[in-house]
Image (tube, rainbow, N blue to C red):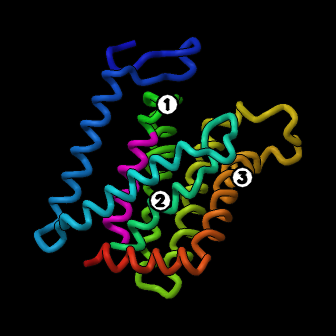
Amino acid sequence: MSVFIASEDAGSYFELTKAGTAAVIVCLVLLVLMTAYVTGDNKHISVRQMVFSASAIALGFILSFIKIYDPPWGGSATLCSMLFVTLIGYWYGPRIGIMAAFSYGMLQFIQGGGGYMLDPLQVCLDYFVAFAALGTSGFFWKKKNALIKGYIFAILLRGAFHSIGGYLYWMDYMPENFPQSLAVIYPIVYNYSYIIAEGILTIVIISLPPVKTALARVKVMANG
């Protein structure tokens, strides 16, 4: 179709070319940088915050390749990759948390060369909005048991956005053996199956005393 987008399967979905992927990366990086630095001198992101946030995003991205459960139409239960994204909100609150999680969504989008695009809104829901939701863990950053509460809220919200996208774009991919009487909840079952599986594993791990102690120390380091 163009140098940036290629049509596949008789135009039923689209995929970014290498040039398109590069263009998306440049545009989204510029968007994130502009958002970070036009909010006033007292709200600039410090070097420490940038380093810790970038490190968490990198670790989350690496762990996203370690898949415990990999359903056929996207999404996966990974080895605690969502935890490292939600940690940023836990450290610094919702503003930095959501920006960082949005950046993580960019990485997920380009991970497979741009992924499949049925529609611009589908891309926004499945990548930018859904993954940015992980940063909403920051709304709990000053509350008791902030990490657990923020993590649970954030991953459930991510699942909600994926489910909305499922209702709008992915119902045609529902397996024939899925009970027709339950078809109305198929996007919810599909998306929360892998999100909750990873969530349970993560909560068990971060509830272990040594891990809990280590995460508390890292938070102190992240805030200087």
> On the image, numbered disc 3 is attached to which residue?
193
Foreground pick, 21 / 208: 208
To which residue does mark 1 refer? 115
Upstream in sequence: badge 2 or badge 1: 1
User: Marks 1 and 2: in contact by CB < 8 Å?
Assistant: no
CB-based contact (under 8 Å), mark 3 and mark 2: no
Q: Mark 2 — residue?
A: 133
Check residue 175 for magenta coloring.
no
Q: Position of residue 151 (x, y in %)?
A: 54, 69
Residue 100 colored in magenta in the image? yes
For marks 3 and 1 on the same chain, the one whose residue lies earlier in the sequence: 1
Q: Secondary structure at mark 2?
A: helix
Relative height, residue 146 to residue 22 (above, below): below
Identity of the residue drawn at 40% across and 79% down: 217
Location of residue 39 by image quarter: bottom left
| Apparent side of residue 127 relative to residue 31 in the rendered image (left or right) | right
Q: Is residue 163 visible?
A: no
Spatial CA span between label 2 and label 1 = 20 Å
Q: Position of residue 41 (x, y in %)?
A: 10, 70
Mark 3 Cα-neighbour bin, 10 Å: few <14, some 14–19, many ≥20: some
Check disc 3 and report its element: helix, strand or loop.
helix
Residue segment shown in magenta = 93-108
Residue type, mark 3 in image: Ser
